Amino acid sequence: MSKTGKRFMVIALVLAVIIGIAGASLNYYNNYVGDGSVYALSRFGSTGSEVRSIQTKLKSLGYYKGSVDGIYGTQTKNAVLAFQRNCGITVDGIAGPQTLLYLGLGGSSGSTGTGKYTADEVNLLAKVISAEARGESYEGQVAVGAVILNRVAHPSFPDSISGVVYQNGAFSCVYDSNWYQPVAESARRAAQDAINGWDPSGGAIYYYNPAKTSNAWMRSRTVIKVIGNHYFCK
């Protein structure tokens, strides 16, 4: 082989090594976060089971109307954008670690959480309790948390705290200024008590304030218990 041919072969091998390293680095960036947890990063053009899970979850929450085909197309991206916008997280159309966590499809459980719930889920539960029942008695705050957990366990609702909270139109507090107020310490304790099994609502999966809602369907539900300003019902 001529010197020129050998030179070209060496250059080609060097380029192959550089491309391989770049690909591995990109894969690491796409699939890992700072704490070493592994996440898939689905975006426009992605395909596979992760995308199907995202589509299924978004469909159950009312954001996605297309077919669950495992193809991250325009409809899926638009559904992710709408979900991110509603949750108040980065709106980029990419189902990264934070979006997956809010969908109940990512994150890690363990000592930082409580039982089967992650620390982020417990914090989210406390945030809803604080926003929805800030002025209620402690029992009333625990009851609101219990309703959310009852929905998680109910076949008619999403099977995660984040799924229940962010289900389209489920909780008006995520759209108003209360959502951005500091979480009350009593709400954190109420979330813990609800997770530990205290259910002052009597197994309710709905509640409403009769002074603030005129929804005929909600008012038609069977009332189980009245705690403060909230009617708890099935």
Image: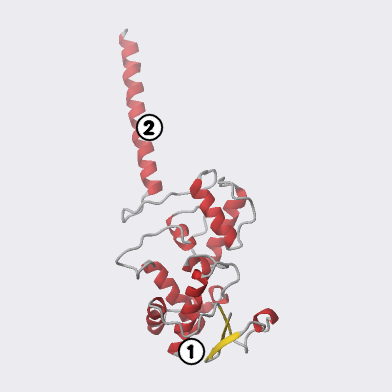
Q: Residues within 10 Å of mark 2 (few under 14, many from 20)?
A: few
Q: Residue furthest top?
A: 1
Residue tagged by mark 2?
19
Height in image: 203 above or below 211?
above
The residue sitting at 56% across, 53% down in the picture is 55
- Measured as percent of width and height from the top left, residue 214 is found at 68, 84
Q: Quadrant of the N terminus?
A: top left
How far is disc 2 from disc 1 in space, using C-alphas?
Answer: 60 Å
Judge from the rendering whether residue 88 lies leftward or rightward of residue 16; answer left or right. Answer: right
Q: How many marks?
A: 2
Q: Which mark is residue 136?
A: 1
Q: Which mark is residue 103?
A: none
Secondary structure category for the residue under label 1: loop
Judge from the rendering whether residue 3 lies leftward or rightward of residue 60; answer left or right. Answer: left
Height in image: 231 above or below 95?
below
The amino acid type found where label 1 is placed reads: Glu
Q: Residues within 10 Å of mark 1 (few under 14, many from 20)?
A: some
